[in-house]
Image (tube, rainbow, N blue to C red):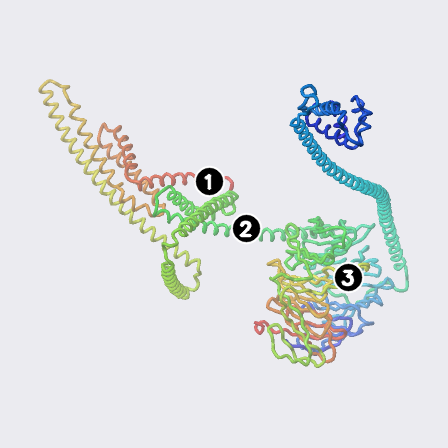
Amino acid sequence: MKFSTLVADGCTATMPESSQVKDARRCSVECRTPPLSQFSQSSLPLHRNSHRLSTFCTEHNLQECLSHISQEVSLLGLSSGWTESDSGSQLNVVAVLNCMYDLIQLHHRSLRTLENMEIEQLKLSSNMDFLKINNTHLKEEVEVSKRQNMGLLERERQLQLKLKSLQNCLKNEKEEVQKLQNIISSRACQFNHEMKRREREFTKLKERLNQLLADKKDRKPAIDVLNNIGRADGKRSLWKTEKTEAKHEGEMYRTLLSNYDMRQREMVLENAELRKVMHQVKKEMVSILKSRKLIPKGENYDHNDTQAASDEDDEVFDPSKESLELFCIDAREKLTNSIRLQWRRLKSHVERLDSQVSLTQISESNNDDVVPRENHEEEMDRLKMEIQRCKDFIQKQQQLLQKQLSCVCNEDSVSLQNDGYMLQEKKRLGEEWKSLEEQRKSFERERRNFTEAAIRLSHERKIFEEDRGTWLKQQFLSMSPFGNSKQLHVPKSASALLIAETEVSAPMGPETLSEWQPDSASPIPRSVSLTSSSAADLECELRLIPENGVTCSSSKHRKAEHFEELSPLCKNISLRDKQWRESEDLSNYSLTPEKSSSI
Amino acid sequence: MNFSEVFKQSNHLCKVSPDGKYLATCVQYRLVVRDLSTLQILQLYTCLDQVSHMEWSSDSLFILCAMYKRGLVQVWSLEQPDWHCKIDEGSIGLVSSRWSPDGRHILNTTEFHLRITVWSLCTKAVSYIKYPKACQKGIDFSRDGCYMALAERRDCKDYVSIFVCDDWHLLRHFETETQDLAGLEWSPNGCVLAVWDSCLEYKVLLYSLDGRLLSTYSAYEWSLGVKSVSWSPSSQFLAIGSYDEKVRILNHITWKKIVQFEHPATIDNTKAIVYKEVERRPAMVSDELSLHNITMSPTLLSTQSKYEICPLPVHIPVVKPEPDRANPKIGVSVLAFSSDSRYLATKNDNMATAIWVWDLQKMSLAAVLEHTSAVRCIMWDPRRPRLALCTGNSKLYLWSPGGCVSVQVPAEGSFHVQSLNWHWSGDSVILLGKDQLCLCYMDTDHEEE
């Protein structure tokens, strides 16, 4: 312990504090029992003992006392202010007082320290008590947990035991189940066997019974009929021969076949129905797509337009073709493919519309304040009115139609529709006719121009010939034959070509082309052939001019360039032409395999 | 709707001739033939004993009367009343007798199913078919009368023999893949034969006319299986009712299940109309005629009833079958297609008071008819989608897609309808009581509409 160590190394007195403590201790010890050793060191132990109860210092031993005290004081580390030598018996009062004061201070200090120590001691002892109590508590706890642990271990052991027994039980049960299953299966087997045996016995008994009953004399099975009746079908019964057997077989297969036939017919009908539905769907999809492509047409001219045109072309071509090869596999594939394509287009279209709608919705929500509600309502009212008007109109039309139908009652709606289509067709054809007429006129004009040009050319040629003749004559006469004959010749032919060119480009002007454009595509290939024929005409016409073959082909080139430069409309048409040719090619391709498959 | 007077009958023996002109009834040992239009007695024949079975020949010229106890069959001619024919099966006994489709042969099944005797009325010839199997439905003639399918049991195996009815030539004979064949039935077009196993195993086999196995169907294992089988008149569907209270419909192309109808105790299908029969005291005289109720002049003692449309969900009373009894009263035992194959009526045995009508176009439940007592007999009109049913009381119930009616039979005394039979024209129904019968004439079409 700290205390004991302090006491033990008190003698060494290395540190001032510890020395103080040691001093204090010594003092306190001295207060109770002054150690004998100190006095044994001193020269006056007995003397001190004898004076102990009375006084320490007397007049006789003043010196000794003084020296003793000074010794003690110096031992205590205080400076003894007096010395025996300097004044002998006379004490330096001041020094003594100082010393005393120091001693008192020391004493006080040691007392305080003692107090502190005692307090500390108390604290420590209480701490100690607390720790002890704590320790006992903990010990108790340990005891308790140990006990619990033991209990748990015991329980675990028990459970283990139980588990083991249960496992055993389970094993037993399993074995039992297995045994029972075996028993059941063996029983089932036995039962089946018995059943079979019984059944066999039963049949044997039946046989026997049959035999017995047949042998029995008293009551035999008998039929008693007044007179035989004819067969229901009036025929006589036939002998059983191989022929009848074959006949039966044949009849059986006939019934089966007829049944399969019927089923097949039903399926064919169903197929046709489904195909019709598919056609319908496709048509509707195409019509929807068409209507969507008409809208952007007015706004922006892009490749969409031409695509729409190609769609229309498809549509115009498809039905007739597919009705021809309705049952061809190719036709079916084509149909499904086209429907798939159309469907994809429709889907993308719808998606685009959706996105547009959402966009407009967003913009509307942004501009919500700009467009007031009244406007909407007004618009709605107006539209409603319009719808009403349209409905009335439709009703009137329907009534008229009904009236017409009642007049011609044997014509059904299909023929009516056909009539409608015919009318439409007629109208279209009329328009076509008109445009063709116009074309014809322009070509007529062109031809006239050409003939005129030709006449003029021949005229010029004649003049030229004459000129040449005269010139040759002159040359011949002047005797200088090869001067500048070419210089005269070339500019003339060039001028003739120029005339031809202008005349060719005139009928292909943008105004006539723009007239063709809204028509359906059918007149276009014819117009193409016309232009090509006009080119051929042109060639023919141009061949009238001698030594001009090469320039003629070049003029054709130039004409084509001219086309391209004409206008965007023209460009469209040429594109369309191209697509037409392509589609024709495609149709050619598609036709050939069909033919092969049909063969 | 009109009713005839009540006539006597016994053993529920009362049949209309196939041509629809005559009505034959048996009263003890007498056979009475009436003109159906006038109900006047045309002929009266006296048999040797009490008749246990009676049947018209297909051409409506002959009537067969079988007396099973004595092993006798008597045949009467309508055209020649003095013509007679008696077939004695002798001591071998008789359990079943029937006409062949041509009306010139009689097939008698002897006791213990020892054999089937084929008697010809044309030649007096007799032939035997051995090893017929004793089962739910072991013999079936095709609709056109050409072929007969017969279940046989030899060497503990099931066989099916197909005979040509014309000359009883054995056309095909094949073993079936069944443990214990329970029944067989031709499709109405006569090209497919449905064969099903006993209730211990769910198995339905479909054979072509030439004996090829077309398909096998099994819905589940290890539980009681098929309880009833029925073809639709169009041969398109094969309905299979089973012990799991479900009806499965197979199609005629792939022979796979196309739909499964369940019979739940609680109906919450909003597409179905649930009609519930509500009884009323006779004192509360009908104060109003609701759309679904036509009350006839009521007899004093009987209670009136009418159908009411129940708001959903509806709970159908369920009787729990006893588990330790054989042939438990559970599962679909009755399947009936309407003549146009549009509707299917079913009855689940543990909900015996309810009849379920399914729409086969929509493949869904169309209506449920719940009654106060168990349904005895259901029958479709042969011409229209109209269902007649009886529950063993004095009322006739009718269902059509338009609605439901319960009609009191205005007979004196107690007339409990236990069974019924449509005339082929669909104009009248024969109602059979315990020992009486009565004709119910339906309104003609234009009056209905």
Seen from the viewer's position, the closer of residues A462 and B410 is: B410
Confirm whether circles 1 and 3 share one chain.
no
Other-residue count near label 3 (Cα within 10 Å), few / some / many at <14 / 14–19 / ≥20: few
Image: A248 above or below A143: below
Q: Is residue B183 left or right of residue B401?
A: right
Q: Amino acid at mark 2?
A: Asn
Q: Amino acid at mark 3?
A: Pro
Other-residue count near label 2 (Cα within 10 Å), few / some / many at <14 / 14–19 / ≥20: few
Identify residue for label 1: A590
Q: Is residue A161 visible?
A: yes
Q: What number is the disc on residue A271?
A: 2
Image: A119 above or below B72: above
Which residue is farthest top? A479
Q: Secondary structure at mark 1?
A: helix
Q: Chain of mark 3?
A: B
Q: Quadrant of residue A236?
A: bottom right
